[in-house]
Amino acid sequence: MAYKRRLKFDKRIRFQKQMNIIYILLFVVLASTGIGYAYIKSNLNINGTANVTAARWDVHFTNLNVTTGSVTATTAASITDPTTVTFAATLDEPNDFYEFTVDVTNQGTMDAMIDSFSISPTLTTAQAKYLEYTVSYSDGVALANKQRLLQNTTETIKVRFSYIENSDKTNYPTEDQTFTIAFTMNYTQADSSAIIVNHPIIRYTVNLYSSNPLNIGRSIPNSIVKYETPEAALAALRLAANNNDIQFYLKHKIQDSIIIESYVGFIVSSEMAQANPGMTAGTYAIRGGINENSTTEKPVFELNKAIILQAFGSANCTNESNCGISNLTVRFTDNGMVMAFNGDWDCSIYYGGASYCDVDE
């Protein structure tokens, strides 16, 4: 505890007020219409009306949301004009972060595409040992030039600033540090070189071990039912098990038909939260199949820990990786194994990435 107090006051990172975190440069598109004339010698009458719709460029920000768990901002993130987000936040100690998502919406009459993007300042080698800032789409897909933003569509951008946990305490700054950070995205009118953003999709399953365990790095066979909502998967497992107390299922992130991430999902109902002080109602998911037991940095383990502590509250946990009440227990290890179970059934992901639901034996 003494270290944390010292770190809070002596090693603090400040993000300065009025930062242009993301700025979209709007290109003015001028449309001109040329009229050609033909001389007709015959007595020929041509009557008609030509309508040309005005071109309109309108790419802007909407729907800004700060991520749960972020530090309290000294100046809350807000959209200060259609194309600018500003905020100020102080990160006091390692593992503090400030993160938000914001939608980029194209309400113009033409498709747009990313012309360029940049983030500044570039961190020095020393700074990169304790500070990280990342910008991506909300699902983790990297930004790239030429990515298309169709008219009347929206993409969600995620911006995150993190004070990194570091095993070598000498890597931390000895004085408060202030950073003014700017991320710039330039959109222009899309042309034939524009590319579609390849977003992964989320699907839910309750496949049984006897049917087919699913594996990260492989596709989901057609014989396995894929659900589009956690509620649908939950209902299917309850029906198969004849057990209405089941509150869990499997969640998969799929890209190019391949499973790239697997999770055990679980739901804390409002009734469960009311009956068990400390629990917070909501839908949660913890990631499995990532072996971190031989590493010093354990980002997946730490994220899973934060999720189940938020869901159950420490009063309902025997330790930071095992929380439960009478009809729902969630457990995970740093070798990639995660599971949720009640007295009879469980849904699990093992350290090799295989996942299935089955009767608890």
Image: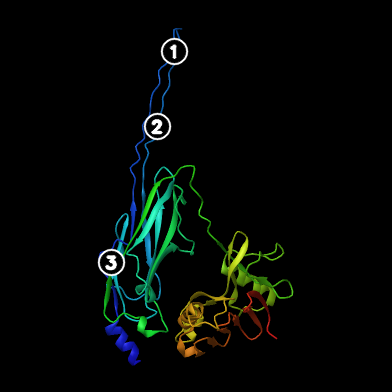
Q: CA distance from mark 3 to mark 2?
A: 45 Å
Disc 3 target residue: 180
Quadrant assignment for the C terminus: bottom right
Sort mark 2 into few (<14), some (14-19) or many (20+) by Cα contacts within 10 Å. few
Amino acid, disc 3: Thr
Q: Are marks 2 and 1 in contact (CB under 8 Å)?
A: no
At x 64%, y 86%, the residue is 343
For marks 3 and 1, give the CA distance.
67 Å
Q: What amino acid is at disc 2?
A: Val
**What x and y, as percent, mark residue 152?**
44, 49
Q: Nearer the viewer, mark 3 or mark 2?
A: 3
Residue lying at 34% horizontally and 90% vertically, measured from the top left: 3
- Packing grade of label 3 (10 A; few <14, some 14-19, many >=20) is some
In the image, 321 versus 131, the foreground residue is 131
Q: Nearer the viewer, mark 2 or mark 1?
A: 2
In the rendered image, the vertical position of residue 325 relative to residue 257, given as above or below:
below
Q: Secondary structure at mark 1?
A: loop
Q: Is residue 30 left or right of residue 225?
A: left
Residue position marked by numbered label 2 in the rendering: 52
Residue 85 position (above or below residue 25): below
Measured Cα–Cα span from mark 2 to mark 1: 22 Å
Q: Quadrant of the N terminus?
A: bottom left
SS at badge 3: loop
Please, which colouring scheme is shown?
A: rainbow
Q: Earlier in the sequence, mark 2 or mark 1?
A: 1
Q: Position of residue 76 (x, y in %)?
A: 30, 69
Crowding near the residue tagged with mark 1, few <14, some 14–19, many ≥20 C-alpha atoms within 10 Å: few
Number of the label disc, if any, that sits on residue 45: 1
Q: Looking at the picture, which amino acid does disc 1 mark?
A: Asn
